[in-house]
Amino acid sequence: MSKLTITANYRREGDDWAVAVRADGKELDATAPGLIAARLAADQLVDEIATGRTNRAVVHMLDGDAFAFSVAYLHTRAGLTPPAPAGESEASTAHEQVIEA
């Protein structure tokens, strides 16, 4: 029996996280109040979409990027703020600089 490949793609929706789980032409969606809760919801959707299949592989992605998901998820699990996604600059703040002679 071949391995079932499943993708779980996460994206921000305001204050919530949406996750879409896809496999074999099927798609299931869920929304959760945080990334960890969305990851747990994805596990439930994977179990539902792969009913009876034990030989499966799940790839978790943040906006289509597996590495970005891993970074965001591990930071969140550790209680850290994830870095800004590539291409997104952090908000700039005004700085006062005093130069003394």
Image (tube, helix red, strand yellow):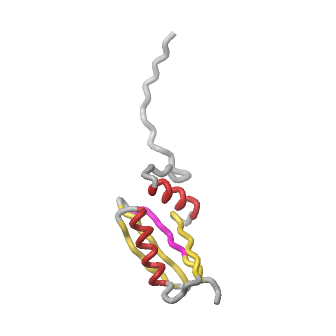
Magenta segment, prevailing SS (helix, strand or loop): strand
Seen in the image, is 1 located left or right of residue 48? right
* Residue farthest to the top, as pictured: 101
Q: Give the percent coordinates (x, y) of residue 9.
A: 50, 69
The part of the image, by quadrant, that contains residue 76 is bottom left
The residue located at (47%, 67%) in the rendering is: 10
Q: Give the percent coordinates (x, y) of residue 58.
A: 55, 74
Q: Nearer the viewer, residue 96 or 62?
A: 62
Seen in the image, is 7 located left or right of residue 14? right
| Membership of 9 in magenta stretch | yes
The residue located at (58%, 77%) in the rendering is: 57
How many badges with numbers are in the image? Answer: 0
Magenta residues, start to end: 7-13
The residue located at (51%, 72%) in the rendering is: 8
The residue located at (41%, 67%) in the rendering is: 38
| Membership of 30 in magenta stretch | no
Q: Quadrant of the N terminus?
A: bottom right
Q: Give the percent coordinates (x, y) of residue 21.
A: 48, 76
Q: Give the percent coordinates (x, y) of residue 14.
A: 36, 60
Q: Is residue 15 above or below residue 45?
A: above
The part of the image, by quadrant, that contains residue 6 is bottom right
